[in-house]
Image (cartoon, rainbow, N blue to C red):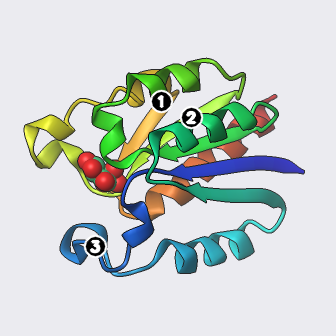
Amino acid sequence: MMKIQIINGANLNLLGTREPHIYGNQSFEAFFEKLQSQYSSIELYCFQSNNEVEIIEKIHQVQQYDGLIINGGAYSHTSIAIADALRSVAVPHIVEVHISNVFNREDFRKKSYIAQACSGSICGLGLDGYRLAIEHIVHCRTLI
Ligand code: DQA
């Protein structure tokens, strides 16, 4: 079975209540349950942490996975350490997701260190970005 790990970083545990005009009003837990039932043939895992070190250590543990989907939250814009961790693992497909459109917000959100260590990024499409990232990883797998 294919294995895909989702990693959510800083403040993403508050999805649903955090700035709902930007991030929507659905909790990630509720959304993730739907994703799991939609993709029941994939082993989907989700990890959230507000702690940079824990995120790095989680990345180190997913060496054998088929794909990794990461939303670093604000760490995207600051963390060279998370970007280097992503470069250190042999996961074939690493996709960055941002729920909001980081390009029509403050300038400091336009730069992502994490994006530079990923195959590509999806932003501004809400939680659907996670589903699209899964679709991409599955699609790439069928090309092998
Ligand atoms: C975010 C965008 C970041 O700029 C912000 O710090 C977040 C969430 C997003 O998913 O849109 O925490 O990564």
Tell me where residue 46 sits by quadrant.
bottom right
Residue under pointer 1:
82
Q: Earlier in the sequence, mark 1 or mark 3?
A: 3
Looking at marks 3 and 2 on the same chain, the residue that comes earlier in the sequence is marked by 3
Tags 3 and 2 touching, CB below 8 Å: no
Which residue: 29% across, 31% down?
78
Query: Mark 2 or mark 1: which comes first in sequence?
Result: 2
**Secondary structure of the residue carrying numbered label 3:** loop
Alpha carbon separation for disc pair 2 and 1: 6 Å
Name the residue that disc number 3 marks: 18
Could you tell me residue 62's position as x and y percent? 73, 37
Residue at the (56%, 59%) spot, across then down: 131
- Does residue 18 appear to the left or right of 37 in the view shown? left
How packed is label 2: few (under 14 Cα within 10 Å), some, or many (20 or more)?
some
The image's mark for residue 56 is 2
Q: Residue at x 23, y 29 (%)?
A: 111
User: The C terminus lies in which quarter of the figure?
Assistant: top right
Categorize mark 1 by other alpha carbons within 10 Å: few (<14), some (14-19), many (20+): many
